[in-house]
Image: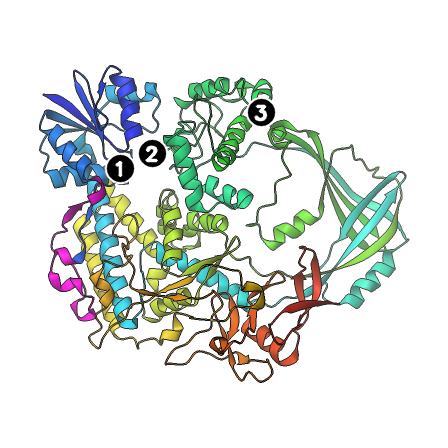
Amino acid sequence: MKTLIIAEKPDMGRNIAAAIDPKAKNHRTYLEGDQYIITWAIGHLIGLAEPDAYDDKYKKWNINDLPIIPDAFKLVPNRKTIDQLKLIGELAKRSDLLINSCDAGREGQHIFSLIQRHLKLKQPVKRLWISDLTPETIRKGFAELRDGVEFENLTKAAKARSEADWLVGMNGSRAFTTKHNVLLSVGRVQTPVLALIYDRQKQIEAFSSLKYFELEGHFNQQNVNYKGMWQGDRMTDKAKADALAAKVKGKPARIASYEVKDTKEYPNKLYDLTLLQREANGRYGFSAKKTLDTAQSLYEKHKVISYPRTNSNYVTEQNIPEMHKALSALQGTDYDALVKGANRNLVHVGNKAICNPSKVEDHHAIMPTHRKANGLNPDEKKLYDMIVRRFLSQFYPAAEYKMHTVLTEVEGETFKTTVKQLLSIGWKMIYADQQKEKKSTSKGNAKEEEEDEEIEVDEPFSIEPNVPVTCTDAIVKEKDTQPPKAFTEGTLLKAMESAGKQIEDEELRDAMKQSGLGTPATRAATIERLKQVGYVEMQGKKIVITLKGRTAIELIRGAGVELLTSPEMTGQWERRLNEIARGTASDEQFMNKVKQFAAKIVDQVRLQSRAAKTSFESEEQPRSAGAKGRKGSARTKTASSGSSGSSRAVKTSEAAAGDGGSVAAKKAPRTRNAATTAQPASSDAGPAIIAACPRIGCGGSLFMGRKGYGCSNYREGCKFVIWKQSFGRSLTDAQVKALVEKGKTSKLKLALEDGTPAEGRIVLRSIDTGELAVEVD
């Protein structure tokens, strides 16, 4: 009898074989040597059964059949990978010991546990628990195999997480869907993420811009010219600002304070998956899913980067020699010059900015491997370049600056100057051949204003504290406070990662420190799911919530189960699951609480009034004159139901229910095609009328669609449409009403067609087509 090693993925299995049994014969789906048989799970081979596996009545969705709470959860093989599951069963018959070599974490433990339970494997189990796949680490891990019984509590926690997600997702989705006749997907992770987007959109819409004025002083001391910003309360009165400018202009000044200090900027942290996704979105516009798929290709197909689905920005002591080998492997490549400038002594086990084993859970940070990168497609090259440059920067010293802070006093008024003088470029030379990186869009307005006052220079800067100064000019700058920015996929990933920070309960915050909403491996899928069910749509890089998404959050909160929309529930779950994994809490008690919550969701939804169809969707709208050549269609997923509340959609499959790998939507209910994305709503309940169509003789009404405001007489040939995204603005109903009735909006901050910022009014140029123009003040 032999020992059967079950890895999580093929690549992991082959790495293990190469490290402990290099002569093992390759049988394509497994490798076999004298002592070991090595195979793999290909991710989740088994999942939780859908409701109709418990009772045929669940094939139809009926709110009266809810809640669905199985006494014992049934397991079903994934039909796509059932052959691999059968193979594991056959190989197990020739084995007297199993080694669980799935990922070192809760989900890796769950994958092995499902296989073990479904196949009823009775062999004793050992556990390989390692955080990377270097040969040294693998061999060390096999020398220190742990008993499988040590991980029974972790298995319980993983099982509880999966079943709890199923209960909330299945019951929540079915309850809201059957009550409101529209496919409404609910989940422990996706729903609070949607709530983040909803709340941000509400903040943007409620924002009222405030005009304010800044005073910039221009100063001269001998041959040195510099600028400073007036220090005082924000000025909203232009007359006051003008008076201050007149007061100081041309007047003698003095240096009230001058401080100089040396500062250093160290290299940015190595990439984890979420950080890589965020930066790839900001730099190249990659979606989270595209970055994940591209990184997975670099890892599995090309083998030029380490395991990408990691939540760590650090490495362990064992990885340091690997980093040095990877550096050597980059010699002779496009990065040869940067390798020659690298200082190997900077990467060592004592450098806690790089090597911090306490912050490495399942896998270390993403890094290049020893393999040469050949045959990469353009997107793979871009992502690989990001990873390599971030890696190389660790071998370079800090960038050094001299910070000059000057307070200049003139006529009793104080102006502040901050000059950042570059002394040594250090690691930033890695990026010297690229365009200057854009400032993070996640910075707050206060931070942006602070940085506006900071001037970065390469040449020496110096002021004499005791030499007189002259205020040569004073310029009043008119500015507007800015609304919060709409989420991009990059900024949403950051918000998901740090969602626990908004929780007041300290214990719950701690429970979410390492996870946030979702995991690095599931966050991209969560964002994609929100798109697929019609909750959000992309407008360029911006994520915009749809009418359906808005209504979903309002219904959930209105039902009295607002906990579903809050990261707090995930925090509560993570705290309890951590306690279950440590053996200090009962998984049975946890599941009982979840069952009660699932039942509460159903009870609360039953009390709701059914929402009007127009609360969820906007249907056909007319094409504008400039849209004739466009192709494509908008699809709105809806479910129709009879008086019993059962949906015909259930004849296909389960709706997108839970998160974290429970049950996904296999087929949506039947949908209706729309001619374009700018068609107005049409429903028995009657959509909201924005204004009368201004086209002479038309007599139609304007309605808001997914991307524009169109006329109800589009079928009769009316071409009038106003696109929601115009001149850098997302037009509101009130602004469209003003355009139609008054011919122009109020004064707005705009962006012209070439991207130039401007201030003016949007005007209705054509009442026949809805074409707009800008009237600049």
Magenta stretch? 52-81
Residue with the mark numbered 1? 108
Residue 452 lies left or right of residue 99; in this view the side is: right
Query: Which amino acid type corresponds to the residue marked 1 in the rendered image?
Result: Gly
Which quadrant of the figure contains the N terminus? Answer: top left
Q: Is residue 112 above or below residue 712?
A: above
Residue with the mark numbered 2? 362
Instruction: Decide: few, some or many residues near mark 2? Use Cα within 10 Å; few <14, some 14-19, many ≥20.
Output: some
Query: Which amino acid type corresponds to the residue marked 3 in the rendered image?
Result: Tyr
| Residue 116 visible | yes
Q: Residue at x 83, y 55 (%)?
A: 474
Separation (CA) of disc 1 from disc 2 = 9 Å
Residue 655 locus on image (x, y percent): 27, 59
Instruction: Decide: few, some or many residues near mark 3? Use Cα within 10 Å; few <14, some 14-19, many ≥20.
Output: many
Query: Which amino acid type corresponds to the residue marked 2 in the rendered image?
Result: Asp
Q: Are marks 2 and 3 in contact (CB under 8 Å)?
A: no
Q: Secondary structure at mark 3?
A: loop
- Residue 64 colored in magenta in the image: yes
Separation (CA) of disc 1 from disc 3 = 36 Å
Q: Residue 36 is drawn in which quadrant?
A: top left
Q: Residue at x 56, y 24 (%)?
A: 334
Q: Is residue 220 above or below residue 249?
A: above
- State the residue in front, 454 or 178: 178
Pair 1/2: label in front:
1
- State the residue in front, 709 or 99: 709
Q: Secondary structure at mark 1?
A: helix
Residue with the mark numbered 3? 396
Residue 254 locus on image (x, y percent): 85, 46
Q: Earlier in the sequence, mark 1 or mark 3?
A: 1
Residue 578 locus on image (x, y percent): 28, 44
